[in-house]
Image (cartoon, rainbow, N blue to C red):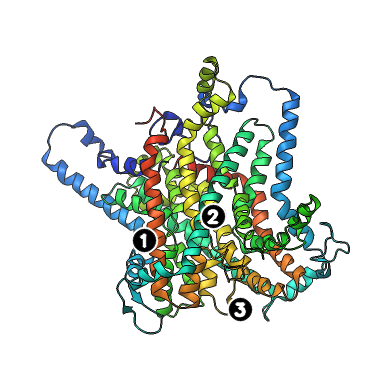
């Protein structure tokens, strides 16, 4: 939500709000010649302090993000194996990407994961948040219980647990067999391993749920009362009050979850023992990028892949931001 | 609803001090309509069933860690037929000639250093963004928010090349440098939101008394943002504890491995040998996080809620 609005809010704050000596304020309006120099000195001191406090962040931003990004853009047009100097090969890496069947499959499963997994996860998060918001007493416990997986879901330990749960005669196979559905191992089955990864993602619905819940608590009661008085039932109130009032939070969750889903790595790496198998069905974009860059030492190609990811995520974020106008409602009391 | 702190008066209290208490914003669930006990009972049953489903994997790993390896893969129930602590005993020995305590100490070291680095550098940056007016502040703030959305993979390769040139592979420097340079925007953002929610009176008073920004930061702001520091510390610890990508890239000798890397060794070998030990070591890795969670859940959940709301 708000990512846009904070920035503008921050920029909007003019130096006029900076503390001024009291004597100055008294003579406001009178163009004193010494005041300008004094203010300039003050603002220079402010700037000095500002850059001082921001120094670690600036070192990090330029040293670990901005300059590496530019370097990586350069590498994307080279052939580089870490040992010999990078060799400029123009757009060869990108034309190779057009022909790379493994990459195409990787993109396909990653997009499936993002486009199927994220909506399910957010729907679960919203549904459970609504359920929890129904009643205050006792909901704190459930909220905590549902949040726990978000903290550990991406860890190696949980990936190992998932492997054990979904293997042949594992807990899931046993449970489904009991219901008469015999699926065997999900890990070894190319058509089941992606659904299994999506389940792992959806299992971590707790973080967006907490954000939804906090948003629901801020919807003014009068709106529901007014809607009820106009004869709106539960469903109408949900569609016409809850959803619009919650739309900034939905936007925020959608943006963050999509960006994160694209970057799934550790669980897929562990579950497939680093192979991306079976049949390449856990070879998510970042897993493939890792293999190309750090196993095959094709760093130029991996850099090109990384930049494609940045562009794709950037375009999606841009579209989402642009789409805000048509569906995200920022409260009327906002200036 | 408030999406900016300037919009309405209600956003004045610091973001993480609890639910909003203004009379206008009662949750929907607190309407005066009296709900029947039947509805409440259904509500409890439904949520309890969901809780069981959601927490099942955690209960499973706890119970399974007491199963002898021979019982895995056979269709027994959740409980071990012959419960044993052999798995844990075996896990203590470690793997690849490195004892378990070594991995634990390594993980602990990296996590504690991460906490120190992140709280220091992020609070400084947040103070600059929230309290100091200077020209580039707005631009830098936008750039910082941008890094929140930036896929980390685009900097992995160049960073690796640079660390490699500097001979820093197989040290903890690549894992920790970013933490001391406020590279994770989440934390800076969390603290900016918190500082902006604090009243400025004390800052102003201190400034009139001649205190400069460093004084204000250390004696006024830092003590006041303690809840945000606690929240950040817990997240920093847990994320570092769970981190797999950076150790996978940078740590090459097993004596330097953090716990997730050790888990990977177990995982690679589990198909041939010891399933029980693999599950037990996973439990060892999960336990500190779960304990942290049980103790600090309020901070964590409020931290997450703040990120979405005031953001």
Q: Quadrant of residue A39?
A: top left
- In the displayed structure, A305 sits above or below B230; it is below
Q: How many marks?
A: 3
Q: Quadrant of the C terminus of chain A?
A: top left
Q: Picture coordinates of residue A107 (x, y %)?
A: 48, 61
Which numbered dot is residue A231? none
Q: Which mark is residue B255?
A: 3
Q: Mark 2 against mark 1, which lies toward the viewer? A: 2
Q: Are marks 2 and 3 on the same chain?
A: no
* Residue B82 percent location from the top left of the image: 88, 64
Residue at 58% from the left image edge and 67% from the top image edge = A269
Q: Position of residue A277 (x, y in %)?
A: 60, 68
* Label 3 neighbour load within 10 Å: few <14, some 14-19, many 20+: some
| Front tag of 2 and 3 | 2
Residue A246 visible in this rendered orientation of the protein = yes
Label 1 Cα neighbours within 10 Å, binned few <14 / some 14-19 / many ≥20: many
Q: Regarding mark 3 in the picture, which secondary structure is present there?
A: helix
Name the residue rendered at 41%, 69% in the picture: A99
User: Which residue ends up furthest to the right in the rendered image?
Assistant: B82
Quick one: label 2, few (<14), some, or many (20+) residues within 10 Å? many
Residue A113 image label? 2
- Callout 2: helix, strand or loop? helix
Q: Secondary structure at mark 1?
A: helix
Q: Are marks 2 and 3 in contact (CB under 8 Å)?
A: no
Q: Quadrant of residue B4?
A: top left
Spatial CA distance of label 2 from label 3 is 36 Å
User: How many angstroms separate mark 1 from mark 3 (CA)?
Assistant: 31 Å
Q: Is residue A157 left or right of residue A328?
A: right
Return the x and y of residue B48 as percentages of the image width and height. Answer: 73, 40
**Which residue is the site of mark 1?**
A61
- Chain to which the residue tagged by mark 3 belongs: B
């Amino acid at each position: 939500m708000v990512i846009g609005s904070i920035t503008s809010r921050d920029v909007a704050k003019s130096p006029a709000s900076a503390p001024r000596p009291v004597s100055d304020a008294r003579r406001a309006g009178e163009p004193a010649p010494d005041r300008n120099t004094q203010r300039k000195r003050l603002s220079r001191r402010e700037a000095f302090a500002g850059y001082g406090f921001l120094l670690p962040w600036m070192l990090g931003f330029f040293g670990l993000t901005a300059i590496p990004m530019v370097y990586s853009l350069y590498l994307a047009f080279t052939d580089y194996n870490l040992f010999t100097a990078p060799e400029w090969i123009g757009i060869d890496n990108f034309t190779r990407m057009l022909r790379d069947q493994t990459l195409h499959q990787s993109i396909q499963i990653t997009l499936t994961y993002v486009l199927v997994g994220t909506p399910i996860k957010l729907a679960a998060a919203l549904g459970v948040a609504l359920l929890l918001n129904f009643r205050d007493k006792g909901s704190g416990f459930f909220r905590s219980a549902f949040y726990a997986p978000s903290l550990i879901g991406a860890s190696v330990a949980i990936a190992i647990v998932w492997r054990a749960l979904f293997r042949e005669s594992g807990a899931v196979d046993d449970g489904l067999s009991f219901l008469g559905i015999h699926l065997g191992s999900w890990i070894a089955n190319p058509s089941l391993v992606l659904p299994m990864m999506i389940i792992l993602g959806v299992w971590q619905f707790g973080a967006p749920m907490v954000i939804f819940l906090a948003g629901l608590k801020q919807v003014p009661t009068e709106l529901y009362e007014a809607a009820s008085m106009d004869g709106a039932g539960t469903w109408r109130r949900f569609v016409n009050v809850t959803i619009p009032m919650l739309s900034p939070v939905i936007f925020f969750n959608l943006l963050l979850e999509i960006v994160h889903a694209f970057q799934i790595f550790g669980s897929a790496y562990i579950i497939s023992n680093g192979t991306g198998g079976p049949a390449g069905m856990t070879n998510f974009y970042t897993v493939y990028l890792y293999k190309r860059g750090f196993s095959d030492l094709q760093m130029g190609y991996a850099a090109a892949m990384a930049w494609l990811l940045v562009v794709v995520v950037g375009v999606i974020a841009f579209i989402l931001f642009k789409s805000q106008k048509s569906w995200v409602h920022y409260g009327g009391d906002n200036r | 609803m408030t999406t900016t702190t300037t919009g309405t008066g209600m956003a004045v209290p610091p973001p993480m001090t609890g639910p909003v208490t203004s009379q206008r914003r009662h949750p929907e669930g607190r309407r005066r309509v009296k709900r029947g006990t039947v509805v409440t009972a259904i509500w409890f049953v439904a949520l309890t069933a969901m809780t069981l489903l959601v927490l099942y994997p955690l209960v499973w790993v706890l119970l399974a860690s007491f199963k002898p390896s021979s019982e895995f893969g056979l269709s027994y129930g959740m409980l071990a037929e012959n419960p044993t602590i052999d798995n844990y005993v075996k896990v203590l020995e470690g793997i690849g000639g490195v004892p378990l305590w070594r991995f634990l100490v390594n993980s602990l070291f990296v996590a504690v250093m991460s906490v120190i680095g992140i709280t220091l550098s992020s609070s400084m940056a947040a103070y600059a963004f929230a309290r100091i007016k200077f020209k580039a502040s707005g631009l830098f703030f936008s750039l910082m928010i941008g890094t929140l959305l930036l896929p980390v993979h685009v900097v992995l390769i160049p960073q690796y090349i640079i660390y490699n040139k500097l001979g820093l592979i197989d040290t903890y420097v690549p894992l920790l440098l970013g933490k001391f340079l406020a590279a994770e925007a989440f934390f800076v953002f969390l603290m900016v939101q918190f500082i902006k929610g604090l009243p400025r009176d004390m800052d102003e008073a201190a400034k009139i008394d001649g205190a400069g920004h460093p004084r204000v930061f250390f004696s006024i702001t830092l003590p006041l943002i303690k809840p945000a520091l606690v929240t950040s510390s817990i997240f920093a610890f847990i994320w570092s504890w769970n981190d797999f990508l950076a150790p996978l890239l940078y740590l090459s000798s097993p004596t330097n491995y953090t716990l997730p890397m050790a888990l990977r060794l177990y995982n690679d070998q589990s198909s041939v040998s010891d399933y029980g030990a693999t599950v037990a070591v996973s439990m060892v890795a999960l336990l500190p996080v779960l304990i942290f969670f049980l103790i600090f859940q309020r901070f964590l959940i409020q931290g997450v809620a703040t990120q979405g709301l005031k953001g």
